[in-house]
Image (spheres, helix red, strand yellow):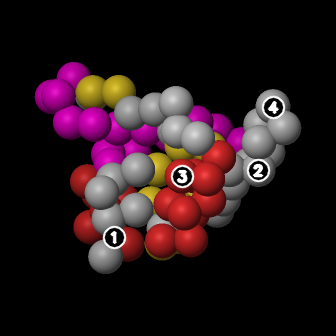
Amino acid sequence: MTNPDELERMARAATPTKYEGYSITRGGAVLSFHPWRGQAVRELKTSPNSHGYPSVHLKTNGRMKRVLVHTLVAEAY
């Protein structure tokens, strides 16, 4: 679990994605800015897809969408 000070530092260095409310760091950490359990920002867990690539589930247009982390990094940087 990432401590609050580390999350704040990561949030300042993160680049927004095309998905509203989410940002990504150069290292591939995906941050959510949707309030959750009293936290303003949190790092999302990654899980491998069927080919072994790290992915995250992002909520867009009221639906969950699985997005590859390396795609988010490539689009942001």
| Residue 8 placement, left or right of 1 | right
* Residue wearing tag 4: 37
Q: Nearer the viewer, mark 3 or mark 1?
A: 3
Tell me which segment is drawn in magenta.
50-69
Q: Which residue is found at the position 48% from the left and 68% from the top? A: 14
Residue kind at label 4, given as amino acid type: Arg
Q: Where does the image place residue 70, in percent across and percent down from the top left?
A: 25, 54
Per the image, label 3 sits on a secondary structure element best described as helix
* Residue wearing tag 2: 40
Q: Earlier in the sequence, mark 3 or mark 1?
A: 3
Any magenta on residue 68? yes
Q: Earlier in the sequence, mark 1 or mark 2?
A: 2
* Residue wearing tag 3: 6
| Residue 40 placement, left or right of 19 | right
Q: Where does the image place residue 75, in percent across and percent down from the top left?
A: 33, 70
Determine the main secondary structure of the stretch shown in magenta.
strand
Residue kind at label 3, given as amino acid type: Glu
CA–CA distance in space, label 1 to label 4 = 29 Å
CA–CA distance in space, label 1 to label 2 = 24 Å
CA–CA distance in space, label 4 to label 2 = 9 Å
Per the image, label 4 sits on a secondary structure element best described as loop
Where 44 falls versus 8 (above or below)? Answer: above
Rate crowding at label 4 as few (under 14), some (14 to 19) or many (20 or more) other CA atoms within 10 Å. few
**Which residue is situated farthest in the right direction here?**
38
Q: Which mark is residue 75?
A: 1
